[in-house]
Amino acid sequence: MIGDVFTFPTNVKQQEEKGYKNPIFDYYEVIEEGKVECRICGCVMAYKKSSYLTNVARHLKRHEKYFEEYKNKKLELKTYRMRSYYSNLLIASSHIFKPEAHIDI
């Protein structure tokens, strides 16, 4: 249980299983492998997995209202992750550094 506290999901599938979701996916839909469609304007873009979020965020800047909304959601998500990480860290440290009971010899 304690080892579980420190593991943060690194790949997208693990993040989805744990309930983490990048807010950029609210604005885009993956049509097929290598193509994504903007839900706002219908623009279809080709992407590589390594540069996907950079290209998509750059395109979202064209839709200023939605980009500001995205930045706020992203900040909220980061804050949530930090809070949950540090609260789990405190829980784990309380289990590890539990004061021992006094033992009479």
Image (spheres, rainbow, N blue to C red):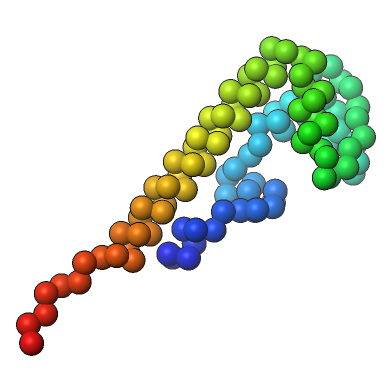
| Residue 6 in view here | yes
Residue at the farthest bottom position: 105
| Residue 32 in view here | no
* Image quadrant where one finds the N terminus: bottom left
Relative horizontal placement of residue 101, taking residue 22 as reference (left or right): left
Q: Position of residue 50 (x, y in %)?
A: 82, 45
- Judge by depth and name the residue closer to the eye, 87 or 17: 87
Q: Position of residue 68 (x, y in %)?
A: 65, 17
Does 52 sit above or below residue 26?
A: below
Residue at the farthest left position: 104
Image point (79%, 34%), residue name:
54
Q: Position of residue 34 (x, y in %)?
A: 91, 41
Relative horizontal placement of residue 22, taking residue 57 as reference (left or right): left
Relative horizontal placement of residue 2, taking residue 76 as reference (left or right): left
Image point (89%, 38%), residue name:
47
Image point (92%, 34%), residue name:
46
Instruction: Give the image quarter of residue 39.
Output: top right
Instruction: Give the image quarter of residue 8.
Output: bottom right
Looking at the rendered structure, the number of numbered marks drawn on it comes to 0
Does 14 sit above or below residue 27?
A: below
Image point (63%, 24%), residue name:
71
* Image quadrant where one finds the C terminus: bottom left
Q: Position of residue 17 (x, y in %)?
A: 62, 51
Relative horizontal placement of residue 39, taking residue 66 as reference (left or right): right
